[in-house]
Image (cartoon, helix red, strand yellow):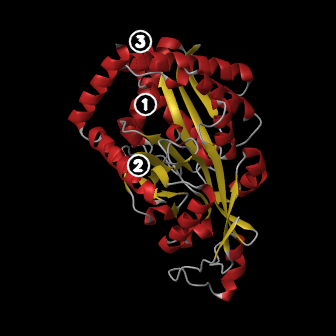
């Protein structure tokens, strides 16, 4: 553990005395206590403090203890070294960075665990701390992070601009647009106009005429999870084969992650992973697999069936029924992750996401510049229609060959 003599930012003045008690409860007060970094190198040792912090932290589904611990378990461990970094002010945890540090060609990058399977990196933070975390504090934290972990760079991928109403203070660090946009929105009210609702209702009636009553069901038993997961794999497999894309969801470790995570959440109000299925009669026509944090639902992946039923705008119908259910259960926001698909705009807003690759050592500078360049090139391709069409065609041919 290391002590950092960090002072509160002058941009956030000390509150009036009448407000102090309430602000302290939420960590809002610009504390003059010493900020400390604590490094823990095992999930088991970090679990109690991590879970306790989740209850009050600004956190995405992909930094929840259950998400990361089950991802690591399904993989059979990490490729690199675990470095769970807690930030403390006095006895209070105010921040959390769950990192994996790898070593390639003598360069040690630190990344959020599971970054390549999540929909965005984020440092879990106490709300008040997040609002007064500035560049000066960040620079000192990064310096100490280097000492504690030995990392040469910190790479953060696809960071949202804000979460749960809190701006992302890590964007005070140098950053650049990510290859993909992020789609998120409020669940406070119906976003669809009358014409769109009529079209969805018309599609539902026609689907019912062809196959039987339409209903959305959450998988609430091990047997239901098995059935929904099996059909999800089949539907995704057909779609990926058409695209010429390898089906990562069919890999053994990913199947373990989905099924174990879904089963473990059967008795939880806000499970780390939840499966829904859209039925028309006895036919399972679409699925949604999502994760939660607090009153936020993140749609991680979905699927729709092939064949004649596919013509009935199944994803629109599934999402219409799903968002209604989520609102009834008290969810206030939703995201549909990364990737540009037109249907997402009916329920969410298109937002920028950002990469930050920060050198922590001299040897890390060259690697940071290289990683930034690679991500920028990927964005240039994905955001240029002709280049992206060519890239997907080449990828499909390579995967089929």
Q: Which residue is mark 2?
A: 349
Q: Position of residue 125 (x, y in %)?
A: 61, 61
Q: Which residue is mark 1?
A: 200
For mark 3, give the secondary structure. Answer: helix
Q: Name which quarter of the figure residue 309 lies in.
A: top left
- Can the viewer see residue 357? no
Q: Nearer the viewer, residue 117 or 360?
A: 360
Q: Is residue 160 left or right of residue 164?
A: left
Quadrant for the C terminus, please: top left
Q: Is residue 348 above or below residue 260?
A: below
Who comes first in sequence, dot 3 or dot 1? 1
Task: Tell me what residue is drawn at x 60 percent, y 29 percent.
Answer: 276
Q: Which residue is mark 3?
A: 308
Q: Name which quarter of the figure residue 203 lies in.
A: top left
Who comes first in sequence, dot 3 or dot 2? 3
Q: Is residue 257 left or right of residue 116?
A: right
């Amino acid at each position: 553990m290391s002590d950092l003599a960090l002072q509160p930012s002058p941009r956030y003045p000390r509150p009036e005395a009448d407000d102090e008690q309430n602000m302290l409860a939420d960590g809002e007060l610009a504390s003059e206590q010493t900020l400390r970094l604590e490094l823990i190198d095992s999930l088991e040792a970090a679990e109690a403090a991590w879970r306790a912090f989740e209850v009050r932290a600004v956190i995405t589904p992909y930094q929840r203890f259950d998400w990361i611990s089950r991802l690591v378990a399904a993989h059979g461990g990490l490729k690199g070294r675990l470095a769970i970094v807690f930030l403390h002010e006095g006895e209070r945890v105010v921040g959390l960075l769950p990192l994996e540090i790898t070593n390639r060609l003598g360069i040690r990058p630190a990344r959020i665990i599971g970054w390549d399977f999540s929909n965005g990196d984020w440092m879990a933070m106490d709300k008040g701390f997040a609002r007064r975390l500035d560049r000066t504090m960040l620079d000192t934290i990064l310096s100490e992070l280097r000492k504690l972990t030995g990392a040469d760079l910190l790479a953060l991928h696809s960071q949202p601009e804000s979460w749960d109403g809190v701006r992302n203070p890590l964007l005070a660090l140098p950053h650049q647009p990510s290859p993909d946009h992020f789609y998120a929105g409020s669940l406070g009210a119906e976003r669809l106009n009358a014409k769109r609702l009529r079209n969805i209702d018309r599609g539902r009636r026609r689907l019912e005429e062809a196959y039987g009553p339409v209903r959305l069901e959450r998988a609430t038993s091990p047997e239901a999870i098995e059935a929904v997961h099996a059909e999800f794999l089949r539907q995704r497999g057909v779609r990926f084969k058409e695209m010429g894309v390898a089906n990562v969801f069919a890999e053994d470790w990913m199947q373990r992650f989905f099924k174990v995570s879904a089963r473990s959440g059967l008795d939880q109000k806000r499970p780390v992973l939840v499966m829904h299925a859209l039925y028309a009669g006895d036919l399972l026509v679409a699925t949604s697999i999502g994760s939660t944090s607090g009153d936020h639902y993140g749609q991680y992946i979905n699927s729709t069936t092939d064949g004649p039923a596919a013509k009935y705008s199944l994803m629109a119908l599934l999402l219409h029924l799903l968002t209604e259910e989520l609102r009834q259960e008290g969810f206030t926001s939703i995201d549909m992750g990364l990737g540009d698909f037109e249907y997402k705009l009916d329920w969410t807003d298109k937002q920028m996401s950002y990469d930050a690759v920060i050198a922590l050592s001299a040897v890390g500078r060259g690697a940071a510049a290289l990683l930034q360049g690679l991500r920028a090139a990927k964005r240039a391709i994905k955001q240029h229609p002709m280049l992206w069409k060519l890239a997907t065609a080449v990828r499909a041919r390579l995967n089929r060959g």
